[in-house]
């Protein structure tokens, strides 16, 4: 059943979209109760610098986790095109502070337009996770619950996440419990998809075996920034990804924010500088980053922990986000 919600109206199955207005901040959009340190860098084995780990990861990783002892669900977060996993440090810590272990691989250093390397690197990382390599990285009193694994990706990383979930690359190492696309992009425009193409332009065509899916979009992603092309062009962006999802699925669009507004406030280096001008942006990154962190937490709690109170509160408008939203969902 497709439905929508707004801050001033109850859930209605008769409509497909609605807008919520921000007045307060829900707790899920703030840092959680768990203490977290700065994300930990974990290096793979290489001939110039041997790893101290018995089972080093196939790619460099950023790993964040609660400091408190316990077993926690796991989120694998894939970075966007030509970005660094370190650009997501504040987002990673936000999610981890709510009781999740977050693993963010650096899928490549340099790459071309073909996204096969993103997908292959993700599959290799999942295989490493299934082999118990992550436990060597974590404190002895912190354990990952590999039966509760979410996969999220931003931009081209979102495309890679969907491609892997759809079986574009064979991996049976671990079963995914939830899939999240953060302003996913499948190419330059319809008809110019990046290999391997994910979008089919057929509604509800994604065969994901009833895996719950959340698609997060931005209103400014499809707007050109100066001399640069739109970073999330219409026809290959979040709208089409959501159209092709089957239930259960939800779609949140932050209309006043851009494609890179969930990154850290400060992104260093040449690539970091490029993030400030290459995509149309909102007034600041902090509200969008808090929203993305909070809605990812709410979605993961709902589908990995069986607690949908935060997710439904946001959908119903009883808990409001730090950004104005348009919401769609199909249950």
Image (spheres, helix red, strand yellow):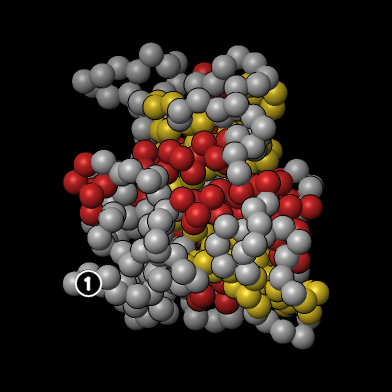
Q: Residue drawn at (60%, 22%), measured in percent from left and top?
A: 67
Please provide percent x and percent y for residue 21: 63, 69
Query: How many dots with numbers?
Result: 1
In front of the other: 104 or 39? 39
Q: Residue drawn at (28%, 56%), measured in percent from left and top?
A: 276
Against 126, residue 300 (above or below) is: below
Quarter in which the C terminus is drawn: bottom right
Q: Is residue 169 visible?
A: no
Q: Is residue 23 visible?
A: yes
Q: Residue drawn at (46%, 40%), measured in percent from left and top?
A: 90
In front of the other: 327 or 60? 327
Query: Which quarter of the figure has residue 4?
Result: bottom right
Query: Which quarter of the figure has residue 205?
Result: bottom right
Image check: 237 left or right of 112?
right
Image check: 322 left or right of 84?
right
Please provide percent x and percent y for residue 175: 63, 45
Q: Residue drawn at (72%, 84%), measured in percent from left and top?
A: 15
Q: Few, some or many C-alpha atoms within 10 Å of disc 1 (few <14, some 14-19, many ≥20)?
A: few
Q: Residue furthest bottom?
A: 14
Against 316, residue 178 (above or below) is: above
> Mark 1: which secondary structure?
loop
In front of the other: 182 or 119? 182
Give the residue at mark 1: 226
Please provide percent x and percent y for residue 1: 77, 76
């Amino acid at each position: 059943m497709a439905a929508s919600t707004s801050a001033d109206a109850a859930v209605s199955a008769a409509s497909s979209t609605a807008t919520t207005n921000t007045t307060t901040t829900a707790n899920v959009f703030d840092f959680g109760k768990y203490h977290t340190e700065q994300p930990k860098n974990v290096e793979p084995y290489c001939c110039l610098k041997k790893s101290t780990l018995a089972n080093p990861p196939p790619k460099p990783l950023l790993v964040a986790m609660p400091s408190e002892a316990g077993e926690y669900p796991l989120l694998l977060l894939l970075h966007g095109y030509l970005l660094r996993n370190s650009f997501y440090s504040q987002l990673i810590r936000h999610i981890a502070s709510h009781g999740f272990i977050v693993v963010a691989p650096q899928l490549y250093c340099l790459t071309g337009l073909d996204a096969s390397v993103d997908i292959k690197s993700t599959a290799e990382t999942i295989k490493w996770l299934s082999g118990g390599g992550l436990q060597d990285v974590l404190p002895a009193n912190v354990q990952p619950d590999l039966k509760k694994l979410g996969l999220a990706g931003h931009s081209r990383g979102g495309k890679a996440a969907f491609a892997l979930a759809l079986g574009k690359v064979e991996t049976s190492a671990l079963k995914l419990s939830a899939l999240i696309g953060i302003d996913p992009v499948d190419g330059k425009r319809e008809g110019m998809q990046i290999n391997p193409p994910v979008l089919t332009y057929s509604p509800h065509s994604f065969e994901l075996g009833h895996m719950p899916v959340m698609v997060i979009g931005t209103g400014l992603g499809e707007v050109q920034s100066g001399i640069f092309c739109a970073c999330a062009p219409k026809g290959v962006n979040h709208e089409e990804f959501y159209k092709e999802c089957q239930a259960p699925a939800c779609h949140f669009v932050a209309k006043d924010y851009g494609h890179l507004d969930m990154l850290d406030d400060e992104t260093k280096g040449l690539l970091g500088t490029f993030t400030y001008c290459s995509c149309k942006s909102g007034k600041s990154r902090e509200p969008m980053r808090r929203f993305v962190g909070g809605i990812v937490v709410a979605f993961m709690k709902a589908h990995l922990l069986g607690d949908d109170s935060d997710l439904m509160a946001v959908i119903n408008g009883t808990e409001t986000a730090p950004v104005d939203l348009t919401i769609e969902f199909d249950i």
